[in-house]
Image: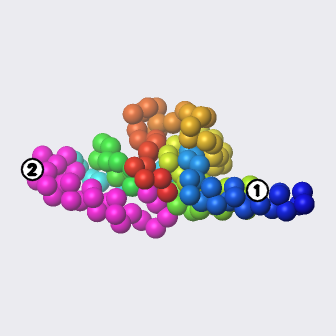
Amino acid sequence: MMFIIIILFITIMSVVSQENPEEYILYLPKKSRKSFELSCNSLGLIKETNPEFYNDMTQEFKEYPPTGMVYVDIYKNNIIYFECSKAIEVVKKYTFEKYGLHIVIKMVVIADIKSFVASYYSEGLLYEPSGKNGDENYPSSILFDEAM
């Protein structure tokens, strides 16, 4: 009888976690941040002279990022992406296989760490976002409108 109750509990928890997955923050090492620098101030010029085209262009960056990456922002003539798609899938798979929990990634943070780590979104930041070359304003986190 006890065995049946345990199986029923595990089944119920699995269904609940599918319907309401826990939101997590994924922390990645600095090497996961990629930037593509454009020569001269072409992005600023495009933004000033043709803001509608600039907005369309940034929307294209979001919708069609390089394989395995997520668009973050444009900063000082750099198009910033995080190489995080594979890590997101690994964390989600591991959490399900190890604990039977369905999770989603609500935020990705680039931190001064050696390998990726995940924590509950509701608990706040485990590691501080890390800028680049001493520039603390350099994009180092992204909060998704819809968790991945």
Q: Which mark is residue 57?
A: none
Q: Is residue 15 visible?
A: yes
Q: Is the residue marked by circle 1 packed among few (<14), some (14-19), or many (20+) residues within 10 Å? A: few
Q: Position of residue 39 (x, y in %)?
A: 27, 53
* In this rendering, position of residue 133 left or right of residue 99: left
Q: Residues within 10 Å of mark 2 (few under 14, many from 20)?
A: few
Q: Which residue is mark 2?
A: 49
7 horizontally vs 73: left or right:
right
Instruction: Residue 44: say if magenta.
Output: yes
Magenta segment: 42-70
Residue 79 position in % (x across, y down): 34, 52
Return the x and y of residue 81 as percentages of the image width and height: 42, 54
Q: Position of residue 31 (x, y in %)?
A: 55, 50
Q: Nearer the viewer, residue 137 or 125?
A: 125
Looking at the image, residue 79 lies above or below residue 86: above
78 left or right of 32 in image: left
Residue occupied by mark 1? 9
Instruction: Look at label 1 and name its amino acid.
Output: Phe
Amino acid residing under circle 2: Thr
Residue 27 seen: no
Q: Residue at x 35, y 48 (%)?
A: 73
In the visual, does 36 lie left or right of 30?
left
Q: Which residue lies at the image location 48% right of the left edge and 53% below the top edge?
A: 147
Dot 2 or dot 1: first in sequence order is 1
